[in-house]
Image (spheres, rainbow, N blue to C red):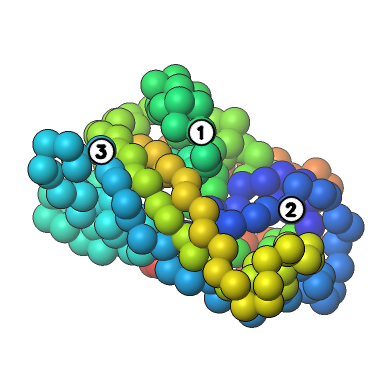
Amino acid sequence: MSKLHKSLLPIVLIVLFSSCASEPERSSPSQFETQQATFKPEPFTITDHKNSLAGGSIPEWVSLSLENSLRELEANVIYADRFVFVSRSEGSNFNALNNWNDKFSTELDFPRLAAARIEARFSSNVPNPDNEYGTFFEALIRASSDTAWTGAVREEDFWIRKKYTLEEDGLEALTGTALEAPTGAATERETWEFLILLTMEKSLFSSQLETVFENLNPNPPPSSGQAASANRVKERFFEGF
């Protein structure tokens, strides 16, 4: 699996710890991946948010984003002719996150969001996209992230404060590190998460994506079977996008 492929995977709803080490391609999941798949953390609770002081509520787009249900938001008549993207950043330093939010550039940062969603579409129900599509896959993700997409609109932003409660056994299974607290003791931590909502007209996104497809020149070329697999997804790309 390429480093580029790994770097653009969509953010999982509740990310507690992540591995930054690059690993060679392998046919079976690592111990860490297995632990991630089986570990079930306690749901977080929202203890504060951007609108709380004014007595406001959490916007629907934020709630759906936290539930990984942005497709439901796209079904709303307000966004009927637009694709929805959300950029998210979570951490323990409010000021640093606020700085990230202020310096977010639609022009510079949207390509990463577009590439991640394109990658997710080609990766859907495919155990190993690099094998399935050959060099086409990495060339596509690279081109998507390098494309100067136009027409993306930053709609609004929001922040929330989240509290997690984790059982020691589950946390140790995820991190591989023993905790000093007694077995079964609950461990709490709080973080902030900033979210930025962006949209783009569907027709505009589609035309630019078609240009990306047309200009791809994978080297070396994928095999005939890999090219056929890629073409099948391209022909029905927006079904499930």
Q: CA distance from mark 3 to mark 2?
A: 30 Å
Q: Which residue is mark 2?
A: 19
Residue at image point 73% right, 63% down: 180
Picture residue at 68% right of the left edge, 72% below the top:
182
Question: Which residue was labeled with disc 1?
Answer: 93
> Would you say 231 lies left or right of 6 here?
left
- Packing grade of label 3 (10 A; few <14, some 14-19, many >=20) is some
In screen coordinates, is 211 left or right of 219?
left
> Which residue is at the front of the view, 64 or 174?
174
Percent x, y for residue 32?
Answer: 76, 67
Residue 1 pos. (x, y %): 79, 57
Query: In the displayed structure, would residue 9 be above or below residue 52?
Result: below
Residue type, numbered disc 1:
Asn
Q: Amino acid at mark 3?
A: Lys
Q: Which residue is mark 3?
A: 50
Q: Counting other residues with Cα less than 10 Å from the Cα at mark 2, is it few (<14), some (14-19), or many (20 or more)?
A: few
Q: Is residue 155 visible from the viewing direction of this image?
A: yes
Taking the image as shown, residue 45 lies to the left or right of residue 115, namely left
The residue shown at (85%, 62%) is 25
